[in-house]
Image: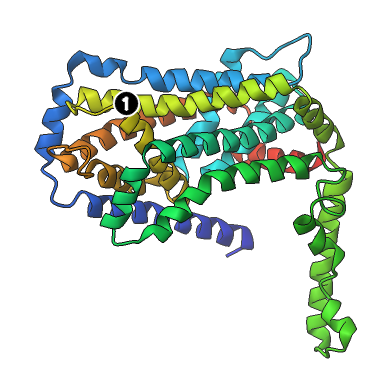
Amino acid sequence: MTRARLTEARALALKAISLILGVLVLCHVFRGLELQNSIDRIRDMGPALALAGLPFLAATALDTVAWRNLFPPGPIALRLSTLWLLRSASEAIHLALAGGVFLSEGVAPVVLRRRFSTPYSESLGAAWLRRILILRAQAFYLGAGLCLGFGMLRETVHRLGHDDTLVVGILVVAPGLFAASCVLVRVTTSADLGFSSGPFPFRLPFRLPLRWPFRVGFRVPAGVRAQVESWEHRLRAVAERLRTGSSTTRGHIRSTLMRRRTMLTSTALFFGAWTLEAIETYFLLRLLGVDIDLFAVLAIEPSVTLVRHAAFFVPAGLGFQEAAYLLFLQSPSLAIADPLSTSAALSFLKRAKEALFIAVGLCILGCFFRSYSMKETTKEGAMESFNA
């Protein structure tokens, strides 16, 4: 078996393992479920169920508008419909695959280049800024949710048998995400992406050679020395490539960062998109007959989102998202009569929406890539991210 085939086999095995893990967690969460109760509750929703997807569509629209704002102004502006289709296609990869958040980033730049002649520097710069602002908006969203639902979070953690140490750890996540977004901006805008003149944590690994122990008297076999020197050479080659390349992309990023109003507007739009996801959950719970306050859902949904993102190794956080919903809906402060069937019905509706969105996104992806293979496109996007 060739190395390429072996790599593909390993990747396929990891995907299968992650999917099996998600299914096992899902079965464990809903053990003892009376399925008919959940089916009856969904059936009782009636025609109003057709309106359940409106908050999600509004969230994708806000996300797309915020993304378009990050492209440089020019005589030919990208159409919102085009970017929405691209967002749907890349989001389908994000939802369908384990680690899809990393794989989906190479799709839009290649399509924009081949179909709409958009320079890689613009599309890659906009994608990078989009990720930074999403991270920042998520920090605000999670912080607001933790403030609104601190008591519920603390009670849920205690029911799991943990003390307040875990609560403090969760509370640190929001400012940690905001700090990470600030560090990414600092590293991006430095002269060489932080590899020799950036912040101390990013400068240190490239100032100290990997073979420094050999220079202070340690004796090691020649083979080990050669291997370490080879690693150092490769590491410095990557650093040099990042330092000398991507100048056009960095220039676009810097110019966009100077447009403060655009950055604030896009961050607010991303925050609005996150909030609309909580409103969607509130709408579905009300249709399921649950008497719940909107602020309670705004307190629950950010923590569920955090759990889902932490389980990125499982496609769409399968099983882990359902477990988070069940834990919060079992809270005594909500006083829900049948939290198990409620969380099962809610999870089914959300997964059905995602399945529909994945199907639509993959169809769009097939239309975009009908003339060339997706494997070549993804590879090209990864290569251009260094050379643009």
Using residue 243 as the reference point, say whether residue 369 is left or right of it: left
Viewer-closest of 243 and 114: 243
User: How many other residues sit within 10 Å of disc 1, few (<14), some (14-19) or many (≥20)?
Assistant: some
48 lies above or below 383: above
Q: Picture coordinates of residue 322 (x, y %)?
A: 30, 44
379 lies above or below 274: below
In which quadrant of the rendered view does residue 220 lie? bottom right
Q: Secondary structure at mark 1?
A: helix
The residue that appears at 47% across and 45% down in the rendered structure is 309
Q: Picture coordinates of residue 257 (x, y %)?
A: 76, 28
Q: Residue furthest top?
A: 75
Using residue 147 as the reference point, say whether residue 230 is left or right of it: right
Q: How many marks?
A: 1
Viewer-closest of 168 and 242: 168
Q: Visible in this render: residue 361?
A: yes
Q: Visible in this render: residue 99?
A: no
Q: From the image, which quarter does the N terminus lie in?
A: bottom right
The residue that appears at 33% across and 61% down in the rendered structure is 162
Q: Picture coordinates of residue 133 (x, y %)?
A: 62, 33
The residue that appears at 22% across and 22% down in the rendered structure is 287
Q: From the image, which quarter does the C terminus lie in?
A: top right
The residue that appears at 38% across and 58% down in the rendered structure is 164
Q: Label 1 sits on what residue type?
A: Leu
Using residue 217 as the reference point, say whether residue 349 is left or right of it: left
In which quadrant of the rendered view does residue 333 lie? top left
- In this figure, which residue is indicated by the disc labeled 1? 294
The colour mode here is: rainbow
Viewer-closest of 99 and 149: 149
Q: Picture coordinates of residue 7 (x, y %)?
A: 58, 59
